[in-house]
Each structure stands twice: as C-alpha cells, then as structure tokens.
Amino acid sequence: MIRQSVRLGDLLVESGLISEEELMQALKIQKESDFSKKLGEILVDEGFVTEREIAEQLAKQLRLEFVDLYGVELDMKLLEQFPLQVLKNAWAVPFGEDDENIFVATSDPLNYDALEVLERSVVSKPIKLFLAMKGEIQHIFQRIEIIHSTKSIVAEVKREIKQHGIKNESQESAVLKLIRLIIKDAILRNASDLHIEPDAHEVSVRARVDGVLHETFVFDLEIYTALASRIKILGNLDISERRRSQDGRFMLVIDSKEYDFRLSSTPTLHGESIVMRILDQQKVLMKMSELGFEEENLRTFHEIIHQPYGIILLTGPTGSGKTTTLYAALNEIKSIENKVLTIEDPVEYQLPLIQQVQVNEKIGFTFAKALKSFLRQDPDIIMVGEIRDFETLSAAAQASLTGHLVFSTLHTNDAPSAVSRMVQMGLEPYLIADALIAIVAQRLVRKICPYCKNESRPHHDLLKRVLKYLPENPIFYKGKGCPECEMTGYMGRTLIVEILSVDESVAQKISEGASRLEIAKTALEAGKYRPMIEDGVRKALAGVTTLEEVLRVTRS
C-alpha cells in the first residue's frame, strides 16, 4: 500500500471550502484539546465544512473513487469473510468484488496500519480502496452486530418451521417469542412505529424513534412468511390474502403493561410490508404544559381553546403530533358540565368524560354523516378527526356558526395555507371568516440529548438561512452522541408551532378572498402570527434542539 501525506487543512483552504482564518481557529481548538480530536472533526463541529465535503476533497487528492454505500447492494457473504474487529479498526467495509480485486470502502484512508492488517487478512485478491462516509460505515457495523445478536432465536424459528410449521394456537412458539423480542426492543427505544419490510434477499425491521427510522433487526427471508403470518393472526387479518392492503388491531402485554397496536399490511414487490403503530395509553394523556409550547404560544393556545364557539384547526403532516395536541386540549376543557363528542378514524386512545365515535366507511358512516348526527346529541364541543371533503367542512362550519366549538385537522404546510385549502374545497370565504377562530400549524423536532449536550456551531450555510432571527454572536448546542441516546445526539421530541389567530383585520382579508401571503402579512402586522421557523430558532438558541433539526422540518 502506497503511503501518502495529506495536509487536510491546506487542501480545504486551496479548494475554497474554508478560509485561512477558519483553519487557524480549528488548529487552535485542536491544540487546546491536546490533539484529542482530529482536525476534520473540529472543522465539522465548528460549522466550517460538512463531512461529505471533506470526504469528496480527500478522495480527489488521494485519487480514490467516492462511493455512496446506501446506493450499493452489499455482499453479506463477502462481509462475513472478514473479522468484524479488523473492519472496525480500519473503519472499512468490503462491499463487492470483480475478477481482480475486492472493493473496500473506508472513511479513514490515511489509517495505513489498520488497512494493511485488513489487506493481510485477505488471501484471495488484492483490495481496491474507495472513500465513504463514516456514518454509512457505522450503520453497516450496527447491521452486522444485529445479525449476530439474533442468530440463536432465528435458528430456533427455522427449526420450528421445519419440524412443525406455524402453530397458530401456540403461545410459546419461537415465532411469537421473536415478535415479542422485536416489539419489546421497540418499546425500550420509545419507538412510535415498527416497519417489517422484505426485499429480494432479507427482511429488515426498522423502528421509528423520535420521528426517524432506525434499523433494529435483519432476518433471512426464510422466516419472513412465518413472521408475517403470525403478526396477521394477532391482528385478525386474513393470512391467505396477500394481494390487498389490510388493517387490524391487537393488544399485547409487555413487561406487565398493556400496549395496543394498530396494524397495516400492504403488498409490495417482494412480499407484504407490515407496519405496527405502538399505542401507549399513558403517553397521550399529556397536559398542555408538557407538549412543548413556548410560553407566549401556550398562553395564546390556552385562550383560543376556551372560546365558546368557532373552528380551531390543527395542521401538519402525518406524525406531527396533531392528535396528541387535540387530546391535550380536550383534556383541558372537558368537564362534567359540558358534552364532548369526537369522530375519529380510527379511535386510537380512549379518553374519560368524552364520547368517542369511529368512522365506518363500509356502511357509509362518514365524518360528514357523523357530524350531522352529532348536532342532535346536544354537544358543547365537537372534535372531527380530519376534514377531507367539502361535505365535512361545510358541516363543521355550520356547527361552529350554531354555537359549537369545533376542533379538527387539515393537511397543509403552514397556518395561512389552511384558509386557501378551505376555499379550494368549496367553502365561501365569508363563511370561513365568520367560523374560524385560529389555525395551529405544528411539527415535531428531536430534542438534544441532555447527557452529551455541548456548544456547537452550525454550518455557515444554515446560519445564512435564518439570519434575520438571530441575535449577535448566537450560541447553539448539539449532542455529540453517547450510550444514553444510542449515539444519535437526540433524546425525545418537542413541538415547534405557529398560531394564526383570526381577529377582525385577518377576518376581513379572508372574506375578501386574499392570498395566503396577504393573510400572513396582515396577521404579522397585527401581532396575531409568528412563523414556525421563528419558534424553532428560539428553541435552538435555548438549547432544546439543533438548528439542523429545525431546518429539517421547516422552510426558512
């Protein structure tokens, strides 16, 4: 292996990615840390350059090809030929071969000693080096460890399949043990959803933790049919039907605690994709103060939900916490003195003192029909799970205009867009202006792990995008990654929101058929609206989340 010397700092200055001053600052930090950190890590931490920019420049200098490992189909049999510790020492992953070479991707091409040990462990062919991102290599190491850790239970499942087939009635079958293991692991991670996805070669299990999917198990295709069938039996689905989507529910006791699971299966090219939503009854009964509203927004939200009548809309994408916010609001205002009715699809959580109704499309019991029947039930407060069509929207508006407080959700990207969406659905602008009290748009952002939180400087491109919201010399924070947060740097989630309150000036604009931008401008001038990005930046400056996370879910 030919050894080359690369002065990374000079290379990045020459390429124009960093300035001479930024290099000097990074070298000073490195010296103060007694050279415990690499220069590249410091440059990334200080926001001067990204990891990918360093990797691409290093690849050019060393005349190596840059490879995106997420876009490559890994040869797992080839991987198994190498000792895992040797690969870890070299931060290297063999990902393929041809007649002459074994292709090896590394994130540390200057670690010559470790790479030579790796090369000596290969008998058959010389290695050809490629450059890859460290995070991608780390993910592959995690995948290998997952495969090793589940080998024994997978072997037990395979033996059971060969000897007995799938035992539907058995409560102690190896397949059910495996399902419990998968679910228990997801619960320990505080996951909201579990995804079981087959491809041409294997089955991947991924858990959505704090809004981001993490691969937790990888199995052979051999056990997929048994696994999928047993889950479908739990959810009362038809195991012989594999061509249509199916939905179901089931309950399991994990560590002496009951959990509900909402189940969905849908046919894909290589088999059925199965998704389980984990429903913990304790998690939804949150107080409004626990949701993550900043003080001023919490005060505004508290005021609007105590109005006697009108429509309050919550907007945001699926999985942005709208249902949790709605339930917290209903919990706040419900009492023995008023009647609260909800129409949902499906009813995920059961709330005391609230009459909950589930949509049944098969018999024609839709949101709109339920809403019309609700008015004969003498309600004070109505919650409509989602406004999907003009009929439901019109019924909600009529209910609000006849003295009822109506909560509902709508899928729009921000609060002012909800007005345009209602007009597109066919409701007259003057009715919207009369009925609407407020629109709350929200997103969930990951919170910085408190165990590894320290000061950090985001990349200068990110700072430019939010410049007008920043004070002089802003200080930001970031989680470095530790065992407590599974090296992600994040733990838990919180809300960032924008609230558009409808006062006389805003109602006037709505009734005139004004555009989204005109409505937003009027509300801003009246002090009735503050964009979500501003709430996000405030939380980033307060050290609750990172600027990268805020810009991941909002538009600047």
Image (cartoon, rainbow, N blue to C red):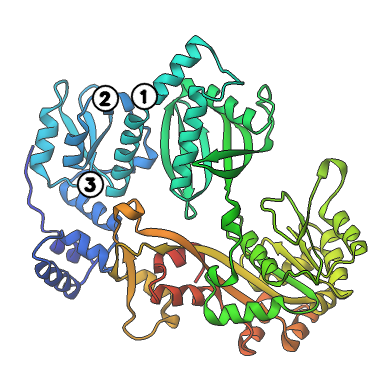
Q: CA distance from mark 2 to mark 3?
A: 22 Å
Number of numbered discs overlaid on the protein picture: 3
In percent of the image, x 15 and y 70: which residue is there? 29
Q: On the rendered structure, is 227 left or right of 115?
A: right
Q: CA distance from mark 1 to mark 2?
A: 33 Å
Above or below, 23 against 185 in this view is below
Q: Amino acid at mark 2?
A: Asp
Q: On the rendered structure, is 210 left or right of 326?
A: left
Q: CA distance from mark 1 to mark 3?
A: 32 Å
Sooner in the amino-acid sequence: mark 1 or mark 2: 2
Looking at the image, the residue that sits furthest to the right is 376
In percent of the image, x 67 and y 75: which residue is there? 516
Sooner in the amino-acid sequence: mark 1 or mark 3: 3
Residue 131 at x, y percent in the picture: 24, 44
Q: For mark 2, what is the residue? A: 98
> Within 10 angstroms of label 2, few (less than 14), some, or many (20 or more) residues?
few
For the residue labelled by badge 3, is the local secondary structure a helix, a strand or a loop?
loop
Q: For mark 3, what is the residue? A: 107
For the residue labelled by badge 1, is the local secondary structure a helix, a strand or a loop?
helix
In percent of the image, x 59 and y 60: which residue is there? 321
Q: Nearer the viewer, residue 152 or 195?
A: 152
